[in-house]
Amino acid sequence: AGRRVFKTHAVAALAPWRGGATEEGIPRGAGVIVVTRNPKDAAVSYFHHGRDTVQYKYTGDWAHFLRAIFLPGLVDFGDFWSWHGTWWRARAKLPPDRLLWISYEEMQADLPAVVRRIAAFVGVPATEEVVRAVVAGASFGSMRKDWSALEQEQLQQTGVVTKKNHVRQGRSGAWREAMSEADSDAIDAAHAARCRAEGLPSSLWEMS
C-alpha cells in the first residue's frame, strides 16, 4: 500500500487508532506531526475563521471573541492549552520516531529546514530539488492561488463559498497589529495559568 495522510484537529486520545496516540496505538511505521502556533496569532486566526465561515453566523467583535470565546476555550476543537496539553503528554510517552512537534513560527523562519526535518521523520529522500519544489508549493502565494481555484470550483458547483479568506495572511507575529496591550496581557495571564495546569512549558511559544 502507498503512503496515506490523515489530517485531524483531534486531541491525542481521539487520534484515529485504537488506543489513541500511544506507543501501542500508533501502528509501526506510522507517525504524527503536530503543528502548533503562538496562541496570540492563533486567537486572531480563530477570530477571522469565525467571522469568515458562513455557517457560524458569528458577528461579534474582537473583544467579545477574545474574552467570551477564545479564553474560556469555547472555540472549535476546545481549549487551546488543553488541546496542546494532550499532545505534549503523548509526545513525552512516545519514541522520537512516532511524533514530530513543529511550529508555524519555525516554518516562517526557515521553511527549507523544516521540510528536511519532516522528510527525515517520514523517511522520504529529500534532494535539494525536492526541497525547493516543496517550499515553492507551500509558499503563501502558491497556497492562495490554489485555494482561489478551489473556491471558484465550489462556487460553480454549489453557488456558495463556505469560507472566505481561508488563506488570509501567511505571517507570524501579526497579533501585534490586531490587539491592544490589555488583550495581550490577558492572553499572557491565561497562558501562564493554563501552561501550569496542563504541564506545558511556557517557553513553547514566543509571547512577546
Image: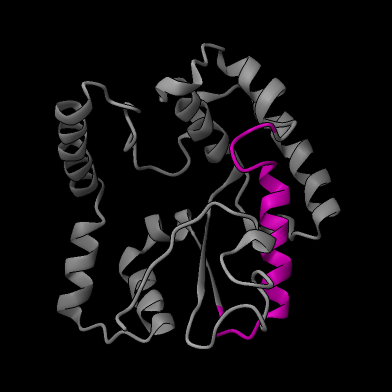
- 202 over 186 or under it: above or below: below
Q: Is residue 38 left or right of residue 164?
A: right
Q: Measuring from the top left, give residue 28's x and y in whole percent.
A: 53, 88
Q: Is residue 113 left or right of residue 13?
A: left
On-image quarter of the C terminus = top right
Q: Measuring from the top left, give residue 19's x and y in whole percent.
A: 69, 72
- 26 over 172 or under it: above or below: below
On-image quarter of the N terminus = bottom left
**Numbered range of the magenta stretch:** 74-98
Q: Is residue 97 left or right of residue 170?
A: right
Q: Measuring from the top left, give residue 101's x and y in whole percent.
A: 55, 68
- Residue 88 inside the magenta-drawn segment: yes
**At 42% across and 25% down in the image, what residue appears?**
53
Q: Quadrant of residue 17?
A: bottom right
Q: Quadrant of residue 2?
A: bottom left
**At 18% across and 45% down in the image, what residue appears?**
146
Task: Tell me, yes or no, if residue 86 can be seen here.
Answer: yes
- 182 over 96 or under it: above or below: above
Give whichever of 59, 108 is nearer the camera: 59
**At 47% across and 54% down in the image, what residue appears?**
105
Number of marks: 0
- Residue 81 inside the magenta-drawn segment: yes
The chosen color scheme is: one colour
- 183 over 3 or under it: above or below: above
Q: Is residue 100 left or right of residue 95?
A: left
Q: Measuring from the top left, give residue 97's x and y in whole percent.
A: 54, 85
**At 69% across and 65% down in the image, what residue appears?**
88
Task: Tell me, yes or no, if residue 175 can be seen here.
Answer: no
